[in-house]
Amino acid sequence: MKGALSREMRIFLAAVGAATVLAVVITVAAALATRRPPPPVAETLLPAGTESGLDVTELELPRAFLAPWKDTWYPSRPRLKRWGPDQVKGFWIDPLKAGIASITAENDADIRELLRQVP
């Protein structure tokens, strides 16, 4: 047994390895060539005698950021745990009657199709 890989396979692997190394070299060279120096740090406008700037306790965050899971909308009425019958009446659809028209039409069409197939 001369070698585990055939000559063609070794040539192929060498070509893939060379292409990979070439791609890495080109990428690194392009990154170094197009690198820009970091922007200058802006001078801070701090009062005289202030050395460290703002303390974390001096920051005031809006309430929305303190509790992002809470509602950001304002309801037009107070929330109710339970609705009364007069409040539900305008929105109630009887589930037994909700699909009667469409189910009837579909059933009629299916029955007609079955009857057409009868010789």
Image (cartoon, rainbow, N blue to C red):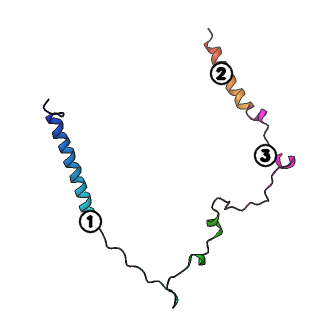
Specify the label residue 91 is tagged with.
3
Q: What x and y, as percent, mark residue 107?
A: 69, 24
In front: mark 1 or mark 3?
Answer: 1
Q: Which residue is mark 1?
A: 32
Quadrant of the frame with the C terminus: top right
Dot 3: within a 10 Å radius of its alpha carbon, few (fewer than 14), some, or many (20 or more) residues? few
Q: CA distance from mark 2 to mark 1?
A: 71 Å
On the rendered structure, is 69 left or right of 14?
Answer: right
Mark with earlier residue (2, 3)? 3
Viewer-closest of 3 and 91: 3
Viewer-closest of 21 and 34: 21
Name the kind of residue labelled 1 in the image.
Leu
Quadrant of the frame with the N terminus: top left
Residue shown at 18% from the left, 44% from the top:
15
Tell me which segment is drawn in magenta.
71-99
As drawn, the residue found furthest toward the front would be 1
Mark with earlier residue (1, 3)? 1
Q: CA distance from mark 1 to mark 3?
A: 66 Å
Specify the label residue 110 is tagged with.
2
